[in-house]
Image: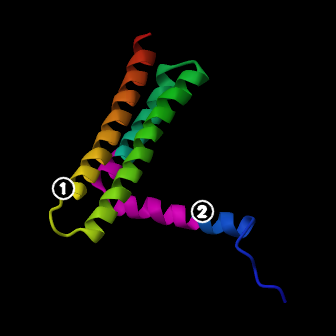
Amino acid sequence: MKPISNNGFTRLYKASIYSWQGFVAAFRHEQAFRLEIYLLLVLAPLAFYLTDNSLERALMIGSWLLVMMVELVNSAIEAVVDRFGGEQHELSGRAKDIGSAAVFIALVISAGIWAGVVLS
């Protein structure tokens, strides 16, 4: 009997499991990500209330999902830095600061999109 390969649907299934584990870990251990999830639960319905245009809704909700995606990447960077660098190091601090800056830029983009849609 041929062993089950790791391509096709099996690979997709396993990737989905790993992604779900990542969501759960971020929700359990990252306060900022939890806050962003809670805000999504408010902002998504608000986007439907504030607009009649599906493109505007997609931009508003998508921009917030971008914030959450960058937050996940930032959290992953922080976890790796913390795992491998217990002592203070300039590069560790720089990596964390750059990840934080990426989250800030995503927040600015999202705020700009929301303001542009609501105020137009």
Q: Is residue 59 left or right of residue 106?
A: right
Specify the label residue 90 is tagged with. 1
Look at the image and tell me in which quarter the C terminus lies. Answer: top left
Q: Residues within 10 Å of mark 2 (few under 14, many from 20)?
A: few
The disc labelled 1 sits on which kind of residue? Glu
Please provide percent x and percent y for residue 41.
Answer: 43, 41
Badge 2 vs badge 1, beta-carbon distance below 8 Å: no
Residue at figure coordinates x 15%, y 63% from the top left: 88
Residue at figure coordinates x 70%, y 73% from the top left: 6
Judging from the image, what secondary structure is the residue with disc 1 in? helix
Which comes before the other along the chain, label 2 or label 1? Answer: 2
Q: Residue furthest top?
A: 120
Q: How many numbered marks have been drawn onto this rendered protein structure?
A: 2
Residue linked to disc 2: 16
Please report the bounds of the magenta region as a residue range: 17-35
Please provide percent x and percent y for residue 13.
Answer: 66, 66
Q: Nearer the viewer, mark 2 or mark 1?
A: 1
